[in-house]
Image: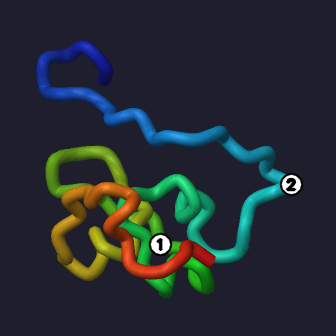
């Protein structure tokens, strides 16, 4: 819950796409700070998050760190 003292949600930059305009793969990849090639071709599975709730991210599923990098440092264009 927002405001429960446990932290909050970080805003994702960009505009929310209409369901009819979702890209292939991860629907957040064009707004993500750390997109990887797999995001363009495969939608991530919904997984339980160890701190509660759920997450849908290839990096979280693989156990890789998901610390956001500045957009300018992301290697290559986001497909």
Residue lying at the far front in this picture: please name it.
72
Left or right of 57: which side holds 38? Answer: right
Left or right of 68: which side holds 76? Answer: right
Q: Residues within 10 Å of mark 1 (few under 14, many from 20)?
A: few
Mark 2–mark 1 Cα distance, whole angstroms, equals 20 Å
User: Residue 49 lies in what quarter of the image?
Assistant: bottom left
Residue lying at the far right in this picture: please name it.
20
Q: How many marks can you see?
A: 2
Q: Residues within 10 Å of mark 2 (few under 14, many from 20)?
A: few
Q: Which residue is mark 2?
A: 20
Q: Position of residue 77 (x, y in %)?
A: 54, 76
User: Residue 72 lies in what quarter of the image?
Assistant: bottom left
Which residue is at 49% across, 40% downward?
Answer: 13
| Picture disc at residue 45 | 1
Which residue is at 25% across, 14% downward?
Answer: 3
On the rendered image, what quadrant is the C terminus found in? Answer: bottom right
């Amino acid at each position: 819950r927002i405001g429960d003292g446990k932290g909050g949600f970080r805003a994702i930059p960009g505009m929310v796409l209409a369901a009819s305009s979702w890209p292939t793969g991860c629907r957040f990849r064009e707004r993500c700070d750390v997109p990887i090639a797999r995001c363009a071709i495969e939608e991530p599975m919904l997984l339980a998050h160890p701190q509660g709730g759920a997450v849908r991210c290839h990096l979280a599923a693989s156990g890789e760190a998901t610390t956001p990098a500045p957009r300018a440092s992301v290697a290559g264009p986001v497909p």
